[in-house]
Image: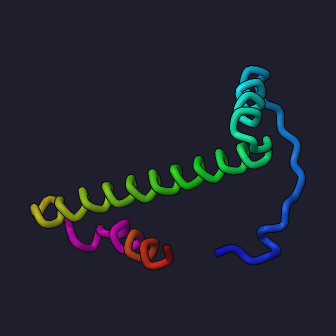
Amino acid sequence: MHSISQLEKQQVGLRLPKYLIEEIDAFTQEYAVNRTDIITEAVKSYIQREKEKMLYESFEKSAKELKEILDGKRDKSELTTLDELIDELEHI
């Protein structure tokens, strides 16, 4: 959850291609929402997707390392990413 100060809005400037602005504006008229809401939701969705992708990639790497250890192809002392993954999962 976010604190009240984190939910405060701050103005930022950005440049988008004209075609994208036209699509956003068409969407705002059709669904009665504003540009800010659309862009905010798009950014939140992108960030969430990227976080999930990084977590998945980290888990996949850790699973491969664990398999190598179980198959005797790698020494247990080399295992670090699984510990890091467990730490990361505890903080979600």
Left or right: 79 in relation to 92:
left
Residue 61 place in picture, x, y as percent = 32, 56
Tally of numbered discs: 0
Q: Which residues are magenta?
A: 74-84
Task: Name the residue located 75 percent from the left edge and 36 percent from the top edge.
Answer: 28
Task: Name the residue located 24 percent from the left edge and 56 percent from the top edge.
Answer: 64
Residue 76 place in picture, x, y as percent = 22, 72
Residue that extends furthest to the left in the rendered view of this protein: 71
* Quadrant in the picture for residue 29: top right
From the viewer's side, name the closer residue of 79 and 62.
62
* Quadrant in the picture for residue 17: top right
From the viewer's side, name the closer residue of 29 and 69.
29
- Asked if residue 80 lies in the magenta stretch, the reply is yes
- Asked if residue 32 lies in the magenta stretch, the reply is no
Residue 23 place in picture, x, y as percent = 71, 26
Residue that extends furthest to the top in the rendered view of this protein: 19
Query: Measured along the vertical axis of the image, is residue 68 above or below residue 23?
Result: below
Task: Name the residue located 55 percent from the left edge and 55 percent from the top edge.
Answer: 48
State the quadrant of the N terminus: bottom right
Q: How is the image coloured?
A: rainbow
The secondary structure that dominates the magenta segment is helix
Residue 72 place in picture, x, y as percent = 11, 63
Task: Name the residue located 39 percent from the left edge and 69 percent from the top edge.
Answer: 85
Query: Measured along the vertical axis of the image, is residue 21 above or below residue 8?
Result: above
Query: Measured along the vertical axis of the image, is residue 55 above or below residue 7?
Result: above
